[in-house]
Amino acid sequence: MLALAIHPDEGEDLKALDDNGWRLIDPARVSSTPGDYQRFVRGSKAEFGIAKSGYVVARCGWFSDRSICYLASGRPVVAQETGFGRFLPTGEGLFAFETSDEALASIEALNRDYARHARAARAIAEDHFDSDKVLGRLLEKLGAA
């Protein structure tokens, strides 16, 4: 299922999605409140993310806040590499891909041992995005800890 706002005039795209078994859901329906959004993420198996081309080309390390929500919910993430692999562990719970073959291999790995990757996803969120840890490291670097 994809939470995707796509214009009805995009017939070719809609047909391609339908032909490949994708079911669309209105993103406003699943994200109109924080609780709705949380239920949607927790009801998902994983996130598959495609980055804007500028982030990919720049290799700036951009990483989606949505992906962080998935990791924190113990849901693995398969995301197009923007350079975030320099800063975050990948290969368990979080997969970075550059080619369609790498994306497919990541999905296959995730499916082979989903429970391990779900645990690793949560651990990445705790280690790299927990506000107490992140703020503590920032204050320490600033000499204010």
Image: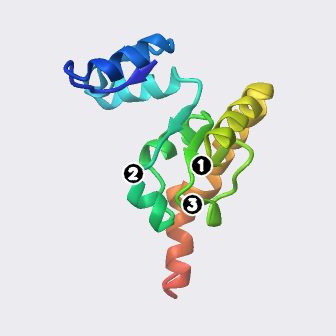
In the current view of this chain or complex, which residue is farthest to the bottom? Answer: 143
Residue 73 in the image, given as x and y percentages of width and height: 56, 35
Camera-nearest label, 2 or 3 = 2
Residue, disc 1: 125
Q: Closer to the camera, 82 or 110?
A: 82
Residue 139 in the image, given as x and y percentages of width and height: 50, 78
Above-or-below relation of 144 to 47: below
Query: What is the number of callouts on the image?
Result: 3
Residue at point 73% right, 36% down? 105
Task: Name the residue type under label 1.
Answer: Ala
Residue at point 60% right, 58% down? 128
User: Mark 1 vs mark 3: which is more N-terminal?
Assistant: 3
Q: Is residue 132 left or right of residue 39?
A: right
User: Mark 2 vs mark 3: which is more N-terminal?
Assistant: 2
Residue, disc 3: 84
Q: Closer to the camera, 95 or 37?
A: 95
Residue 3 in the image, given as x and y percentages of width and height: 37, 24
Residue, disc 2: 52
In the current view of this chain or complex, which residue is farthest to the front? Answer: 12
Task: Name the residue type under label 2.
Answer: Lys
What element does badge 2 sit on?
Answer: loop
Spatial separation of the CA atoms under disc 1 and disc 3: 14 Å
Say few, some or many: other residues with alpha carbon within 10 Å of mark 3 (under 14 / 14 to 19 / 20 or more): some
